[in-house]
Image (cartoon, rainbow, N blue to C red):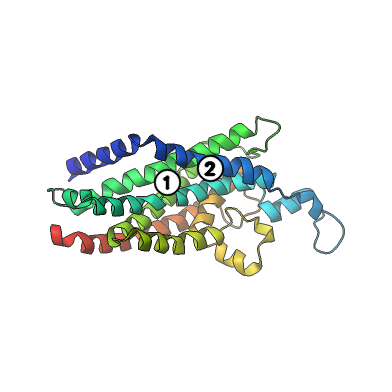
């Protein structure tokens, strides 16, 4: 099985490398978000400081409540964009399977001696690699913008050690694997592109909009805050924000959020194994 997994994974990466237009468009979206949305939509935390009811006594107290310790909305937003791209970039994992079905490619792959685990695993690895790389591209770009005075950028205010860096990597990898697993399973189960995109958007948009990836935490109503704290996207970006800005505004450490994210990953992967085995059983 290992040989088949390596061969099929290599095929997926070659197919991706031979499509530079897809790579360019995947990079274009986060660049536009960081440049336009992040720099155009700003919230001044100092406006919430004052002696009146509902205001905060110090600027740091306002930052802790609104942006969970981030020094600005842009820094808060930049971490959220990592979770955003990790979700949106995996949408095409299942779509590629459906298009391969329409052209007969997926049927030929299933007709080879490769087991279903290798077929699924190769696509999962390739599908997760793209959002992982894209997430680190977003972080690097946001840090680079901080060196350009006309633009806002990601300002890291905490000391990031080896442990913190590993926690950031783990959060990005777990989130990317989780949604790649989810959408890839949909692609294997569904044969019609329109049905697939309707199904994934039913999940994609509510997951992103109920997370704190884009919304300032302090502006959320209490019921949305309660939902957001269990959202896998929120769990991942909370790890990044704690590592980059400190943990004073968080009830738990990064390890707890990583544990919750790992639980989401294991649950979805277990469901995917059952469904994929059933879907691919006839040709084995």
- Pick the front one: 6 or 111: 111
Q: Which residue is drawn at 25% across and 60% down?
A: 276
Local crowd at mark 1 within 10 Å, few (<14), some, or many (≥20)? some
Secondary structure category for the residue under label 1: helix
How many dots with numbers? Answer: 2
Residue 72: numbered disc: none
Residue 173: numbered disc: 1
Residue 1 at least partly seen: yes
Residue 217 appears at what percent x and percent y?
65, 57
- Pick the front one: 224 or 93: 93
Q: Residue at x 44, y 39 (%)?
A: 133
Residue 81 appears at what percent x and percent y?
55, 47
Q: Name the residue under label 2.
A: 30
The single residue placed furthest to the bottom in the displayed view is 223
Q: Which residue is drawn at 68% across and 35% down?
A: 151
Left or right of 195? Residue 79 is: right
Q: Which residue is drawn at 14% across and 58% down?
A: 283
Please state, as top left, top right, bottom left or bottom right, where the C terminus lies in the image: bottom left
Residue 246 at least partly seen: no
Residue 158 appears at what percent x and percent y?
63, 40
Residue 188 appears at what percent x and percent y?
28, 58
Secondary structure category for the residue under label 2: helix
Marks 1/2: CA–CA distance: 18 Å
Where on the picture, by quarter, is residue 72? top right
Left or right of 201? Residue 188 is: left
Q: Earlier in the sequence, mark 1 or mark 2?
A: 2
Left or right of 135? Residue 246 is: right
Left or right of 13? Residue 156 is: right
Which mark lies nearer to you, 1 or 2? 2
Local crowd at mark 2 within 10 Å, few (<14), some, or many (≥20)? many
């Amino acid at each position: 099985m290992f040989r088949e997994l390596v061969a099929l994974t290599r095929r997926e990466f070659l197919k991706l490398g031979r499509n530079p237009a897809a790579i360019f468009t995947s990079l274009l979206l986060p660049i536009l978000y960081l440049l336009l949305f992040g720099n155009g939509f700003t919230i001044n935390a100092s406006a919430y400081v004052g002696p009146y009811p509902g205001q905060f006594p110090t600027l740091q107290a306002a930052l802790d409540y609104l942006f969970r310790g981030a020094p600005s909305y842009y820094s808060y937003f930049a971490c959220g964009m990592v979770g955003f791209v990790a979700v949106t970039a995996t949408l095409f994992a299942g779509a590629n399977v459906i298009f391969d079905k329409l052209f007969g490619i997926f049927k030929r792959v299933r007709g080879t001696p490769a087991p279903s685990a290798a077929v699924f695993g190769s696509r999962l690895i390739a599908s997760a690699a793209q959002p992982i790389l894209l997430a680190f591209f977003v972080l690097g770009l946001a840090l680079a913008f901080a060196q350009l005075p006309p633009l806002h950028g990601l300002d890291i205010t905490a000391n990031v050690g080896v442990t913190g860096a590993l926690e950031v990597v783990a959060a990005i990898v777990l989130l990317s694997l989780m949604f790649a697993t989810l959408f890839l399973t949909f692609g294997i189960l569904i044969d019609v592109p329109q049905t697939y995109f309707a199904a994934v958007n039913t999940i994609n948009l509510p997951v992103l909009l109920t997370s704190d990836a884009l919304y300032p935490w302090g502006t959320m109503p209490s019921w949305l805050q309660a939902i957001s704290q269990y959202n896998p996207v929120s769990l991942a970006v909370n790890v990044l924000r704690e590592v980059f800005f400190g943990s004073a505004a968080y009830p738990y450490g990064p390890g707890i959020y990583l544990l919750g994210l790992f639980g989401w990953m294991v649950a979805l992967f277990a469901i995917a194994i059952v469904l994929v085995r059933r879907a691919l059983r006839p040709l084995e």
